[in-house]
Image: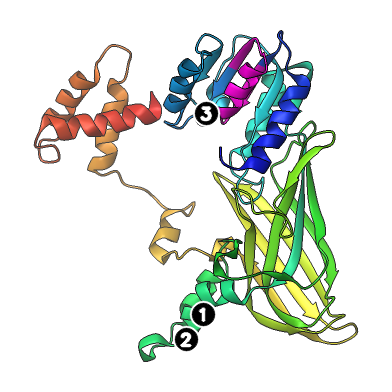
Amino acid sequence: MFADAVRMKAYEEALLRVVTPNTTVLDIGAGAGIMSLIACRLGAARVWAIEPNEAIQVGRDLAVANGFGDRIQFFHQESARVELPGRAEVIVSDLRGLLPLTPYHIPAIVDARRRFLAPGGVLIGKRDTLWAAPVEAPGHHAASIGPWEARPHVLDLRAGQRIVTNRVLAGTNLAGPLRLLAPPVSWGTLDYATVESPDVAAAFDAQAERAGMAHGLLLWFDAELAEGISFSNAPDKPELVWGRMFLPLSGPVPVAAGDVFRIALDARLIGDEYLFRWDTRVAAPGQPPKADFRQSTFHGNPVTLESLRRESAAYIPVIDDDVRIDRLVLSLIDGMNSLAEIAERVQEAFPARFPGRREALARVSRISGRWS
């Protein structure tokens, strides 16, 4: 992340515009604190850095090493659980992945905008635009789908092909070049000053400009951090730290110039992960379709009937020792018992599961770290 010069230069320029000696900056998803350090170097009076990952300790060490230890306050939690002592004039964040559609991104920005941004304050980034285009990607197809088609060991593995063709892949050049078959289409805009929903959906047409073999859809984004300050992970730009998203088609489709791709894209946040759906119909104008695919990451993970039954509304769960252990630990986390005291109680109650105090303490520490 530090080494991505395009990304870092854009963020530094955006911070330079708005940071003054009176500015309070909130850095969400601070990681090792590079944005917080830059804000301090540019003169920010105070920085609040929020990061749930253990990388926050690197940020603390770097803050001290650079003489900013008294100006950066670190919060080792998810931002939704943080209570700040005030509001910030600037909120800076980079919670993107292959797309800005990561499970924690938009919910965190919406929450921070409501609770932490001062009136008239500035959000960095400002806006992201999502793009898509059908592509020819023989290397991707050969690397990810080809092995399921090749009948290795004289075995038919095509039953597993449905899994791999419904998974999101990183669209880098590691598996060979990607060539656009049609001009890119914008299928969504995330304006962080107003966005409320983490879900994005669109339907659009893309007309092939040349003949080729369609293997999938390439997705990327343009990031606008401030007016006139932007960067992009588009395929004609230098590759950034995230790479790009590749959605494979169920099978390769030969296309001719003038063929129309009718595409419906849907990205929906379900629980703590995004569910992507992409429907793709390919046809020459006025002709029957060459392909008509319905794909979703819902089908990209194998699941047994037993697992589905256990998640149905009619399923009646029965507790086992793991539930009893966790329930006992949680009942003893009451602000008075130490982890060692809780571990002792747990070992006494479940001697067969915890032959030694160390094993019990490891289990208790893990539960405490998650819930206390």
Region in magenta? 25-47
**Residue displayed at 70% across by 55% down:** 220
Q: SS of the residue at dot 1?
A: helix
Q: Name the residue under label 3.
A: 78
Residue 146: image tag: 1
- Front position in the image: 158 or 152: 152
Q: Quadrant of residue 117?
A: top right
- In screen coordinates, is 257 left or right of 293? right
Mark 1: amino acid = Gly
How far from the left and from the top, in percent, is residue 147? 46, 79
Q: Is residue 239 above or below residue 49?
A: below
Q: How many marks?
A: 3
Q: SS of the residue at dot 2?
A: loop
Q: In this view, does 188 lie above or below 191?
A: below
Mark 2: amino acid = Ala
- In screen coordinates, is 47 left or right of 313? right
Q: SS of the residue at dot 3?
A: loop
Q: Callout 3: 10 Å neighbours few (<14), some, many (20+)?
A: some
Label 2 to label 3, Cα distance in Å?
45 Å
How far from the left and from the top, in percent, is residue 346? 18, 29
**Residue displayed at 69% across by 52% down:** 233
* The residue positioned farthest toward the right in the image shown: 286
**Residue displayed at 45% across by 60% down:** 308
Q: Quadrant of residue 9?
A: top right
Q: Contact (CB < 8 A) between labels 1 and 2?
A: yes
- Front position in the image: 230 or 275: 230
**Residue displayed at 81% across by 70% down:** 182
Q: Name the residue under label 2.
A: 150
